[in-house]
Amino acid sequence: MARLRVRVELSRGGAGVPLHKLASVVEEARKFLLMLGDDVKVDASKGEWLGFDFDHEALNFTAEFVGPVTAEQVASFYAAFDGTTPLRRATIAQFARITDAIDEDELIGFGLFGAGSAAAEPEEWRCLSRRDALRIAEEMQLLIGAAEQEGGSHLPAVTDSGSRLFRRAGRESEGDLAERLARVESKVDQHSAMIGDLRSQSAMTEQSFRNLLGAVENFCDQAAHQIERASPVVLAAAPVAKKRAPRWALAAIAGALGVAAIFASWRLWPARPAEAVIAKSPVPSAPIAPAAPVAAAPAETPRPAPMRIEIEASEPAWISVTDPDGDRLAVGVIEPGKPRTLDVDGPVMLRTGNAGGLLVKLNGKPLGAIGPRGKVRQIAFKDGKFTISSLE
């Protein structure tokens, strides 16, 4: 007997689902299944959609229509997910509304069992994200004002042979997001390298300026000695007119001081304030009191050592990596054969919904078993060390 079943998954392997997401996704998905059934001529009055095979701590279940259906109706129902079955615009719009309650980095998976299949697991998967829903809504706008064919309508993405209504995907469903995160991480690395180069160049420029000031001071000292040697001795008995210092020496000193002043103003203003000049005071008659001891400057806090975290899955497992501020560094489902590597400079928290399906390494060393299969665990990484704890 033909069976009409669809597997719906959200936050696979996660630790719970907010109630507003659960209620919204289930209700909007229910409406879509009913409308899609009407499009393929399934008589909803002779049956009912029921939920089976609920997963623990996640919104994952199988929706099955308990009622009479033909093999042709089942095939046409599943063909809608490839965009080959004509659908009403209202049905397509309802499908886009399923994503109203989910976040940007979340996806809803639809598992297709196939016509007449009695398998326990779906044969194919499709996914839906907020991004897909926006694309569908934009393509719906293109249909406004166009003549609708009798019996249903197709989206332009289907008729131009470029893509399908529902994007095909595996259960990890994070390809586009992973690519975007990789591009962002690459940009951050490039900017960090540029900042490092700027700091190095700034230090070199400051050292060159110090060397120039030293050279100018030596030149001034040597010029002063030359002037003293060139000055004639004045005799008391026969007064002689005084000779002026050579003009070339005065011009050289003035030029050197001008260059030094221009370079110093360009280099130091407004990056650092000018040093205060302390005027010398005459020596007092009374003895000077000893100066108070100066407190030593506090030692600079050492920077935390960088850590490399390698995550590899032996079976699908949901993970989430966050920093102390709650910002997500990585989130999604990791599949076997697709390891993830994170280089961090500070403490982070790794949470997984399938502890037995992960192999985690810290700086190249495996952490060992972190928990049983299907259990939720979290690992705190800090200063090259780790702590495993349970949330159950």
Image (spheres, rainbow, N blue to C red):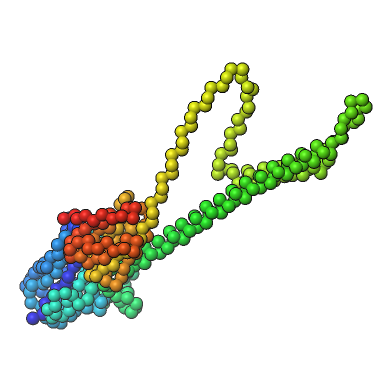
Residue at point 62%, 46% (across, down):
210
Residue 42 visible in image: yes
Where, by quadrant of the figure, is residue 166 drawn?
bottom left
- Front one among 233 and 323: 233
Above or below, 330 relative to 165: above
Above or below, 299 relative to 71: above
Residue at point 34%, 64% (across, down):
364
In the rendered image, the quadrant that contains the N terminus is bottom left
- Front one among 355 and 190: 355
- Front one among 290 and 276: 290
The residue sitting at the right extreme is 238
- Front one among 267 and 108: 267
Counting from the top left corner in percent of width and height, residue 387 is at 26, 54
In the rendered image, the quadrant that contains the C terminus is bottom left
The residue sitting at the top extreme is 286
Counting from the top left corner in percent of width and height, residue 224 is at 76, 39
Where, by quadrant of the figure, is residue 125 drawn?
bottom left
Above or below, 383 relative to 298: below
Residue at point 69%, 42% (across, down):
217
Q: Is residue 343 left or right of residue 360?
A: right
Residue 141 visible in image: no
Residue at point 18%, 75% (across, down):
122
Counting from the top left corner in percent of width and height, residue 117 is at 14, 80
Where, by quadrant of the figure, is residue 386 drawn?
bottom left
Q: Is residue 382 left or right of residue 8?
A: right
Q: Is residue 29 left or right of residue 279?
A: left
How many callouts does the rendering have? 0
Counting from the top left corner in percent of width and height, residue 305 is at 38, 54
